[in-house]
Image (cartoon, coloured by chain):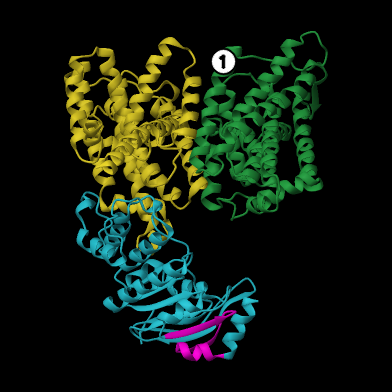
Amino acid sequence: MILRVEGLSKSFGGLMAVHDVSFSIQQGERCAIIGPNGAGKSTLFNLLTGHLRPDAGRVYFQQAEITGLAPHRICRKRISRSFQRVNIFPMLSVFENIQVALLAMQRKSRMIFAAARKMARQETEMILQDIGLAGQEEVISGTLSHGDQKRLELGIALAANPILLLLDEPTQGMSPDESATAMALIDRIARERGITLLFIEHDIETVFALAEVIRVLHLGVLIAEGKPEEIRANDEVQRIYLGERK
Amino acid sequence: MDFSALFMQFLSGLSQGMLMVIIASGLSLVFGTMNILNFAHGSFYMLGAYACFAVVTLLPQVTGNFWIGLLVGPLAVAGIGGLIERNVLRRVYSRHLLDQLLLTYAFILIFDDVVKMIWGIDFQSIRMPAVLSGKLDILGRSLPHYDLFLILMGPLILAGLYFLLQKTRIGRVMRATASDAEMMLALGGNVRVLFNRVFMLGVWLGGMGGALISPQAAISPGMAVSIIVESFIVVVIGGLGSFWGTLLGAFIFGQFNAFGILFLPRMAIIFPFVLMALVLIIRPWGLLGRPESS
Amino acid sequence: MKRVLLRILGPGPLGPVLALVFLIFLPLAIGESWVSLIVEMMALAIFATSLNILIGYGGMVSFGHAAYYGIGAYTYALLLTKAGAPFLLAMAAAPVLSALGALIIGWFCVRLSHIYFSMLTLAFGQIVFAVTLQWYGFTRGDNGITEIAVPLLLQSTLRFYYFALVLTAVCLWGMKRIVDSPFGKTLQALRDNPLRTEFMGINVRLYSLAAFVIAGAFAGIGGALFAAFNHNVFPTFMHWGKSTEALVVTLLGGMFHFLGPAVGSILLIFLDKIVTSYLRYWSFVLGILLALMVLFFRGGFAGYVMGRLNAFGAKREGSQ
């Protein structure tokens, strides 16, 4: 069991964004968190990554408690995250985006007199190969297409050599084809590196292809969890989504 | 130090403060609605003074020429402001703060020389209007009538502004735009025209400040530079974009100056900056500002 | 021809080395007053490049950077005149004290961002200015410290020029190394996306403060160099007008290139000298120029030139 969440709750003002959510994730699992808009998915992520402090509840990673730790400490535990809105370094080149994350991981960011050009080249190239952006090293990342930026986003998250990878809507803004490609890429990388995946997706069909376990959030409450077939057959889930699609 | 002397200092600080209210409101209004920090606001203040001076020198024999200058000058300056907004400033709205500051700084440079071209570098002055040139006896000391006039003008203009913002339709539109310009645009509001009018109003306030001070102060190109930093201090203390904040900030500023000069003359020029720094460190959004506004 | 230019102006040491060689031999060809002018450009170049570490590379718009320039200048002046210190010690002490000032002031400033950061740097800058102005007993206030003599060895214009050249070259090289280092890259990442940088495990405030202090130190060297050149220091060295001068110069030359501010320094001082000998209204010209740059040539002079050359380079590549 790599991640255990117990009774996690968070409210904003009077609004209960996440309410008494508990679940556990096994090593190597592919878990998708789905739910309509406003279900509390991003808030849950923010609680896990330290961007928000929970009002109640605990989070355990590899048996150690990480509740309420600051984001950069959680990063050091090799929990990495991608963001819903593309969160790259737009004025840096593709190469530099990955490199700067690698250097941070290697604790070399504070070096003032070394020439960065020559550092972490191999590791950067490997990640660029993995995400399919090799050959575009010098391109300024802000000029990339949305899809490529999302890949770079993934690359930055991978640079931290994560054990657990949290992906916040990785296919947002992509066409169905692009989504399929992106998910295949994530699948392959996760398999090759033995990464446990926890991802938020809004579109169910995308999720069914990849996830082994699906957890459904609705109005901050975990209402269902199980294998894809079980979720598909779940009446309550159908009602929520069909009701939404009206 | 007896009470009457202290009271006189208080009044002196009040008159300075109330003048600053007018000037700083212009800066704050433009920032609050359009999210533009107009570095050149001081230049419009200076132009207001020179415009008033121009009217007075063009109509030397007309009685009440100062009052005509007070009326016409700031309006003319507002017109110039409107032209600048429409043709130049508009282009940098979506850009970084630095661009806006540099562009408005360019106008400081331009107006500095324009004024020198037309009127030269010597100090100019306007004679005090006859009706206000007397002094009032308070507690055995004398307060110039003009100071009293300034103490009254500040709240008067502020009240007019308040009425505009709270009671009129255009005021409501301005306030709505201040909190959410994108929404206003989506609702079909003619944000462009609104921005232009708001900018003109802000400039008018600055110009009016300059015109009002012209009988008391030396009119010179250096006016622009000294007033802009003081305006920044006032709006930072009170809170950028906050209506009442500007009043509070200006009042505090005026009093700090007045009593600073009295008790610690050597340190007096440092005080406003120290106060500005303290506010920014402890409560960056100002005494009456809101945290989200940044 | 353009291909050669591309080679020179692109990354790599060829350009700077050529420029250095050019500057070494330049005094043989021009008159003394021009040599003096170049020294002035060099002091401004150090100052403006240090500011660009904050603005261009760090995304922190400081309006009070002249404070550290002034502290450096006054440190040099005071050590030389009041303490009778040797010249090199006075010069070396300047960046140390500037860095110290930057550390104290920066500690408060880096807690804020955007406009509040800018305002606080302005406030502190003016405080430093006002204190220098008013502390007559120590700094001689408005009168400044005048007639500061340089050692006999450097009293000729030419010798001082070469001293300044060495100092400027070393400073610019140092700043370039810092900007190209992992620290420099992380600083740029911080500029682009502070939230993400934090999530990479970086203490954003610490890195911002470090950049602030480094920039302050180099500004101090620029100030000391100018003080030595000018033989006088005045409180106006710390005024926000001086800070704005560095900003203008950085914009003119281009804030997205390392040597942009240096180019801008050359342009500004050169234009100033030319224009003021014909026109009285230099501010007007500068204002128009500045407005045009902000509106149409955002990348500055360097940005424009590099843009044209890169377009040319891309075209050639495309046609091959």
Q: Residue furthest toward the front?
A: C319
Q: Residue furthest toward the top?
A: B61
Residue position for label 1 = B116
Placement of B70 over or under C121, stated as above or below: above
From the top left corner, tell me how far across and down residue A232 is, in percent.
51, 88
- For the N terminus of chain C, the image quarter is top left
Is A147 part of what is drawn in magenta?
no
Name which quarter of the figure residue B255 lies in.
Answer: top right
- Amino acid carrying mark 1 in the image: Lys
Tell me which chain appears green: B
Placement of B11 over or under A217, stated as above or below: above
Q: Nearer the viewer, residue A180 or B131?
A: A180
Name which quarter of the figure residue B55 lies in.
Answer: top right
Is A226 part of what is drawn in magenta?
yes
Tell me which chain appears cyan: A
Please report the residue visible at 23 percent of the width from the left and 34 percent of the height from the top.
Answer: C3
- For the C terminus of chain C, the image quarter is top left
